[in-house]
Image (cartoon, rainbow, N blue to C red):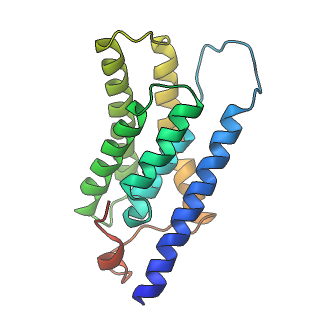
Amino acid sequence: MDNMASSRVWWFRVLFVIVAMGLMFFRLLPLDTRPQNWAGPDILMALIFAWSVRRPAAIPSILIALVIFSEDLVLQREPGLQAALVIIAAAWLKLSLSYNSDASALREWMLVAAAVVGVTVATRFILIVFFVPLPGLGLHLSQMVATILIYPVVAAVTHFVFGLRPVTAQSGEFGTLRGRS
């Protein structure tokens, strides 16, 4: 049983990397070249949080770091800032939901919303402290709100399409998949 659970964890890791690279590819496509007054959701962040909440062992911190750091480099953001903040938020989500593995969808959504707000506020604060030129506040806020609103859709896709169901104490996988980062 342990070997089957281990192979399933590796399958989820490979699937996560493939989906993350696909999201980065579509984010780089020049679909609209005019400046925007609003920003779309950060689907990769929502995906990482959904994965962290539902299968903590399937998405270790080093994998999050590699994926987000590569996205930082590709999108020409401050290298490592987003990666560090998303790792901290994902670890916080793993810890806060590990105490109550049978959390409701609304509680999960509220915790993820708090993590998204935390990442956004911390990003703005750190960029202000280091005098980095910032995009407008409206862009960061619209991306934050859009990410929070898209999270239930991302969670549903991970559940129904990828088969990433939350680990519960009754599933038998609680001891093997819970608590690793």
Point 41% across, 39% down: residue:
83
Name the image quarter holding the C terminus: bottom left
Q: Relative to 37, does residue 142 appear above or below in the rendering? A: below
Which sits in the foreground, 180 or 74?
Answer: 74
Task: Give the residue at the far left of this rendering.
Answer: 99
Q: Relative to 169, does residue 89 appear above or below in the rendering? A: above
Dividing the picture into quarters, in which one does residue 85 lie? top left
Point 66% across, 35% down: residue:
27
Task: Give the residue at the far bottom of this rendering.
Answer: 1
Q: Residue 180's spot in the image, x, y percent?
A: 30, 65
Left or right, 124 with reference to 98:
right
Q: Residue 36's spot in the image, x, y percent?
A: 65, 15
Point 39% across, 28% down: residue:
120
Q: Residue 100's spot in the image, x, y percent?
A: 26, 63
Q: Residue 77's spot in the image, x, y percent?
A: 50, 25
Dividing the picture into quarters, in which one does residue 118 lie? top left
Which sits in the foreground, 149 or 30?
Answer: 30
Name the image quarter holding the N terminus: bottom left
Q: Relative to 5, does residue 96 appear above or below in the rendering? A: above
Is residue 60 visible in the rendered image? The answer is yes
The image shows a total of numbered marks equal to 0
Point 44% across, 79% down: residue:
6
Q: Relative to 136, does residue 106 appear above or below in the rendering? A: below
Left or right, 68 with reference to 104:
right
Dividing the picture into quarters, in which one does residue 167 lie? bottom left
Is residue 169 visible in the rendered image? The answer is no
